Image (spheres, rainbow, N blue to C red):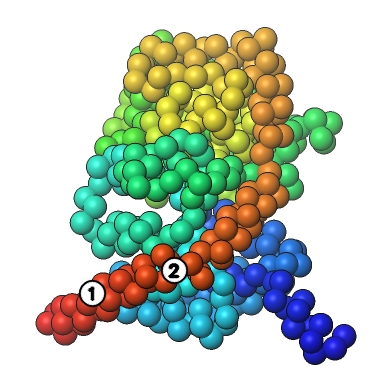
Amino acid sequence: MSTKNYQQVRSTVMKILVDGIFFQLAQSGISRVWSTLLTKLANKSDIEVVCLDRGGAPIIEGIRLIPFPSYTFSATAAESFLLQDICNQVGADVFASTYYTSPVETPSLMVVYDMIPEVMEFDLKHRIWMEKQVSIVHARQFVCISNSTASDLQRFYPTIDNNQIHIGYCGYDPEHFFPASQRGRSEAVSSKLLPSRNADRPYVLLVGSREQHKSYKNCRLFFSALKQMPVIDFDVICVGGEPDIQPDFVNGLSKMCSVDLLRVSDAELGALYRGAAALVYPSLYEGFGMPVLEAMACGCPVITSDQSSLPEVGGNAPIYISGRDVREMIQALNSVRVQEVRSTAIIKGLDQARKFSWDNFADIFIHAAKQTQKMSHKKEYIDFTKKYSQIRRIQKEVDVDVYVDM
């Protein structure tokens, strides 16, 4: 291939710089989103991805990692200029952050997971939430992981146009999350996972955080329901979330059921879903609700609330509750044990889960990235970056003064 032809091929390749900040901060649902997305992008011939590794970034064939300083939540404006330097060095067409950082000139595409801090009235004066606001202002296009999240984004930022927003639903990993029918029968859950329970006794699952700000995860409702049930013929398994189960959740339950807290791999979580009587997910707000999708993909009936994005994910498969009535929770827990109800929930859940895939998410991300790339040469965007750079430069100087004073 001649040099001229090689340059023409290179010019058709869009280069995306991804700030892997979230891998430094936590290994959770957001990490899973980006690990999977990066793997999908690595297989695209018209995309080249460079990822900044602040610590914990996954090694993925086809993704170039560049070591980068850890995030400190302090000199964020100075980081914007450093990020711009890296964008210039690698020739980035588009910048995408895994968690609320931005350069000053290269147009950015923002993946919006949720608007929990805004909806739940967190203290938005904390630096990370202020940087979220800055990142939203800088972003030219948005991939929201549900219509509910998109609606909330526009509610708090009404100047964002519909044509800037793309809905990209999350997917699930079929290697770990699949129905028992694919193996002919459900595999036995290893006794080493559940040392404190009778192997023949049914169990329900709670996955993820159980508390959070203003208790929006709403697991207190579930435990309140248990305490009002005259008989409990199942145990409870909590997976992930806080390091301990809140004592007031389980006080008085020890003679009726066991409550275990487990840390498991994705493969083990899939096995737990396949063996469970139900997933109970009573959250009052979710940007998406990954456990609901993963449970359905495993043929596990779901009890969840009808709030925020959860009906988008669950469709007509879950047993829905308002999330505010203990009696509803008790009725749902009794209902999900009825074989006809279980069978219907399983069939509908498997059908619903098939609608979601990471390939679709990656395609939507790429489309949004290409729309973002088009912004870089528009006069209105060039004018914006000049003003944005000035503001970040002033903030950078203030940050330095504050840092020196401390």
Q: Which residue is mark 1?
A: 395
Q: Residue furthest right?
A: 1
- SS label for mark 1: helix
Q: Tell me the distance, in whole angstroms, between the alpha carbons under discs 2 and 1.
A: 25 Å
What residue appears at the point 61 percent right and 22 percent down from the top-left corner? 317
Residue at 62 percent across and 72 percent down: it is 15
Q: Compare residues 367 and 58 and report the one nearer the observer.
A: 367
Question: In this view of the protein, which residue sits in the foreground, 275 or 177?
Answer: 177
Q: Quadrant of residue 64?
A: bottom right
Horizontal arrangement in the rendering, residue 235 relative to residue 158 (left or right): right
Residue under label 2, please give it: 379
* Neighbour tally class for label 1: few under 14, some 14-19, many 20 plus, Cα within 10 Å: some
Picture mark count: 2
Local crowd at mark 2 within 10 Å, few (<14), some, or many (≥20)? few
Is residue 283 something one can see in this rendering? no
Q: Nearer the viewer, residue 106 or 314?
A: 106
Residue that protrudes farthest toward the bottom in the picture:
3
Q: Point out residue 297 in the picture as x, y percentages from the top left corner.
A: 68, 34
Q: Is residue 255 left or right of residue 184?
A: left
Residue 290's spot in the image, x, y percent? 55, 41
Estimate the x, y position of residue 13 in percent, counting from the top left: 70, 72
Q: In the image, 205: left or right of 390?
A: right
Amino acid marked by disc 1: Gln
The N terminus lies in quadrant: bottom right
Between residue 269 and residue 304, name the one nearer to us: 304
Above or below: residue 197 compared with residue 392: above
Q: Does residue 177 appear in this view?
A: yes
* Circle 2: residue type: Lys
Q: Considering only order in the chain, which callout, 1 or 2, is on the residue closer to the N terminus?
A: 2
Query: Residue 208 location, x and y as percent?
Result: 47, 42
185 shown above or below 32: above
